Amino acid sequence: MERSSRKMNFLIEETICRDLSEIIPPGKRSHFVNEALRKELEHIRRQLAVRKLIESSAATKKFSTREMVEELAGDRSGH
């Protein structure tokens, strides 16, 4: 499935730019950056979801850490 793309302007550190240019070949950099951002955004979403779960747990059924870890692991394996 082809995804639409959009150009964005932002700054990155010089060392990151240098490493990206040295390590990732031209033509592959946009894909690399998209995948890195996708993974980081998913990580942040998961952190926010866990925080919401913990904050709302006072008014709902209590979940153990083990139960939360198992649920998150199941969610991750489904993607």
Image (cartoon, rainbow, N blue to C red):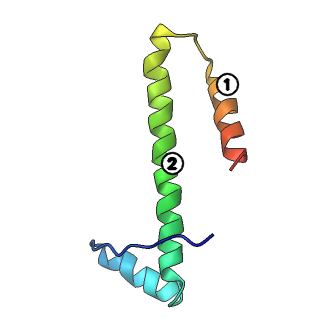
Question: In the visual, does 10 lie left or right of 20?
Answer: left
Residue extending furthest bottom? 26
Front one among 28 and 64: 28
**Image spot of residue 70 (x, y percent):** 70, 31
Identify which residue is drawn at 53% across, 74% down: 32
| Residue occupied by mark 2 | 43
Identify which residue is drawn at 49% across, 81% down: 29
Residue 23: numbered disc:
none
Q: Quadrant of the N terminus?
A: bottom right
Task: Identify residue type, mark 1.
Answer: Arg
Task: Identify residue type, mark 2.
Answer: His
Is the residue 57 above or below the residue 67 in the image? above
Question: In the visual, does 4 lie left or right of 64?
Answer: left
Q: Whole-Å distance between the Cαs marked 2 and 1? A: 19 Å
Label 1 sits on a secondary structure element that is: helix
| Residue occupied by mark 1 | 66
Front one among 48 and 64: 48
Label 2 sits on a secondary structure element that is: helix
**Image spot of residue 72 (x, y percent):** 64, 36
Q: Are marks 2 and 1 in contact (CB under 8 Å)?
A: no
